[in-house]
Image: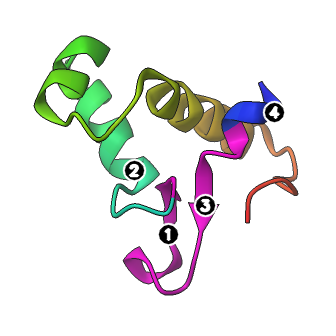
Amino acid sequence: MENLLKRITINPEVCHGKPTVRNMRWPVEVILDMLGSGMETSEILEDHPELEKEDILATLYYAKLSISGDILKEVS
C-alpha cells in the first residue's frame, strides 16, 4: 500500500499545493468526488485515459490515511 502513496504528490506549483495524482492536474478531491458521485473506476479510466487504476486506489488510500489521523510522511 505504501507504493500507492508515491502516486500522490504535493507541489506548490501544481493545483495550489493540493494533493494530486502523479504531479498531474488531478487533485485527489476531484477523483474522490467522481467516485462519490457514483462513477465506477472503469468509467473514470475510460473518460480519462491518462489515469491508471493504481491512481484511483492511491486516492482512496490517501483519503483513508487522512481521516485516520496517520501522518503522511511519504507524500511529497
State left or right for residue 19 relative to residue 56. right
Q: Going from the N terminus, do you reach mark 2 or mark 1 first? A: 1
Q: In the rendered image, which residue does mark 2 sit on? A: 29
Looking at the image, is mark 4 or mark 2 nearer the viewer? 4
Q: In the rendered image, which residue does mark 3 sit on? A: 9
Query: Few, some or many C-alpha atoms within 10 Å of disc 4 (few <14, some 14-19, many ≥20)?
Result: few
Q: In the rendered image, which residue does mark 1 sit on? A: 18
| Label number found at residue 36 | none
Q: In the rendered image, which residue does mark 4 sit on? A: 2
* Rendering quarter of residue 10: bottom right
Which residue is rendered at x = 73% and y = 66% of the image? 76
Q: Which residues are magenta?
A: 5-22
Circle 2/circle 1 CB separation < 8 Å: yes
Secondary-structure class at tag 4: helix
The residue most toward the front is 50
Q: Amino acid at mark 3?
A: Thr
